[in-house]
Image: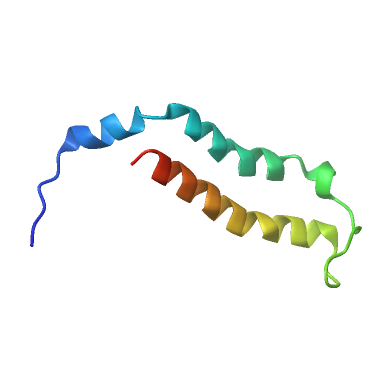
Amino acid sequence: MSQHHDPKSGEEAAAKRPYLYVLLLLPFIALLWVPFYNGTGPSLMGFPFFYWYQLAWVPLTSLIIWIVYKGNE
């Protein structure tokens, strides 16, 4: 089954809520400033803060991308 794809629909969708794209800067800024999370405490299940902080941003970034995607459908 083929669907008709309108090239303008993507541009129109991006124009719906452009302020949502600011959310995509959160992971970038949060991980860019290394002195903020360059430490061992507090630990979480034996992992130093330096490691679990970065790992926590993996699902958070996926969630943010999904929110931006759904907000611009």
Q: Is residue 6 left or right of residue 38?
A: left
Residue 43 locus on image (x, y percent)? 87, 64
Which quarter of the rendering shows the N terminus? bottom left
Q: How is the image coloured?
A: rainbow
* Vertical comparison of 61 with 51: above or below: above
Residue 47 locus on image (x, y percent)? 83, 68
Quarter residue 9 falls in: top left
Q: Is residue 31 left or right of residue 20?
A: right
**Residue placed most toward the observer, 73 or 44:** 73
Number of residue marks: 0
Q: Is residue 59 left or right of residue 68?
A: right
* Vertical comparison of 71 with 1: above or below: above
Quarter residue 26 falls in: top right
**Residue placed most toward the observer, 34 or 45:** 45
Q: Is residue 48 left or right of residue 65?
A: right
Residue displayed at 27% across by 30% down: 12
Residue displayed at 42% across by 40% down: 71
* Vertical comparison of 8 with 27: above or below: above
Residue displayed at 78% across by 44% down: 34
Residue 25 locus on image (x, y percent)? 58, 36
**Residue placed most toward the observer, 33 or 56:** 56
Q: Residue furthest right?
A: 41
Which quarter of the rendering shows the C terminus? top left
